[in-house]
């Protein structure tokens, strides 16, 4: 997506440890017009897949998933990083290692909301080493649901997570794939 790349190039900041900070438009402060285009693009790529549910993880993926879900007319389900008192014990759970936060989370979704008949599209803001998406895929498999594919706004191609999932036969659609990052430049995969 041309507009996404322009935003990354003009407003993104590269930090040590291969961190790309895009919080001024994607995952802290949100440019809703850009998000609308992102949602429309995910819909264009997956519209023939009969998606019945959009799955993401809290918190950064929720806004992107919600805008995307409007196009599919499907609900959004997000994996929670903490069990709260208002969630029953009947949950699917999996462990996810966060690259950004350098910690492991046990994430959960209620069995009430993820069923075998669901056709699930996973959406997230970033795909780096693939741990978050692999965990969400595990939740889909636990439910016996069908995984339609995974969509990431920005993939750090040099970290290999997306390519490893593609090698397993998982459909991964990333709107911008960055093959290398340095302090002053980004190289995109065409």
Image (tube, rainbow, N blue to C red):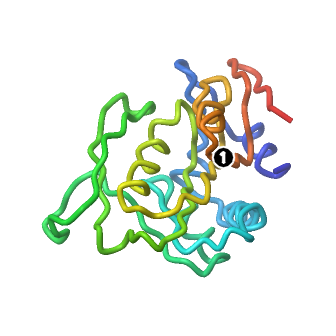
Looking at the image, which residue is at 77% across and 39% down? 10
Image coordinates of residue 90 in percent, x first then y, are 19, 66
139 vs 104, nearest the viewer: 139
Task: Classify residue 101 as left or right of residue 35.
Answer: left
Q: In the figure, 54 relative to 60: above or below? A: below
Q: Which residue is mark 1?
A: 172
Secondary element at image label 1: strand
Image coordinates of residue 111 in percent, x first then y, are 29, 68
Task: Classify residue 22 as left or right of residue 179.
Answer: left
Query: Quadrant location of residue 96?
Result: top left
- Quadrant of image for the C terminus: top right
Image coordinates of residue 89 in percent, x first then y, are 15, 64
Q: In the figure, 2 relative to 148: above or below? A: above
Task: Classify residue 56 as left or right of residue 64.
Answer: left
Looking at the image, which residue is at 58% across and 39% down? 127
71 vs 112, nearest the viewer: 112
How many residues crowd mark 1 within 10 Å: few (<14), some (14–19), many (20+)?
many
Task: Classify residue 53 as left or right of residue 95.
Answer: right
């Amino acid at each position: 997506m041309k507009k996404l790349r322009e935003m990354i190039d003009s407003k993104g900041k590269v930090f040590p440890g291969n961190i790309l900070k895009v919080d001024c438009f994607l995952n802290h402060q949100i440019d809703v017009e850009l998000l609308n285009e992102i949602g429309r693009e995910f819909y264009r790529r997956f519209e023939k897949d009969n998606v019945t549910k959009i799955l993401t993880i809290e918190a950064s993926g929720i806004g992107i998933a919600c805008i995307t879900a409007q196009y599919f007319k499907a609900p959004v389900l997000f994996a929670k990083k903490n069990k709260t008192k208002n969630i029953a014990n009947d949950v699917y759970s999996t462990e996810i290692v966060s690259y950004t936060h350098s910690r492991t989370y046990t994430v959960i979704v209620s069995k009430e909301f993820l069923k075998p008949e669901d056709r699930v599209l996973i959406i997230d803001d970033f795909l780096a080493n693939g741990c978050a998406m692999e965990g969400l895929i595990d939740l889909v498999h636990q439910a016996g649901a069908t995984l339609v594919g995974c969509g990431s706004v920005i993939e750090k191609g040099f970290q290999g997570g997306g390519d490893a999932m593609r090698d397993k036969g998982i459909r991964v659609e990333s709107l911008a794939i960055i093959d290398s990052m340095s302090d002053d430049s980004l190289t995109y995969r065409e």
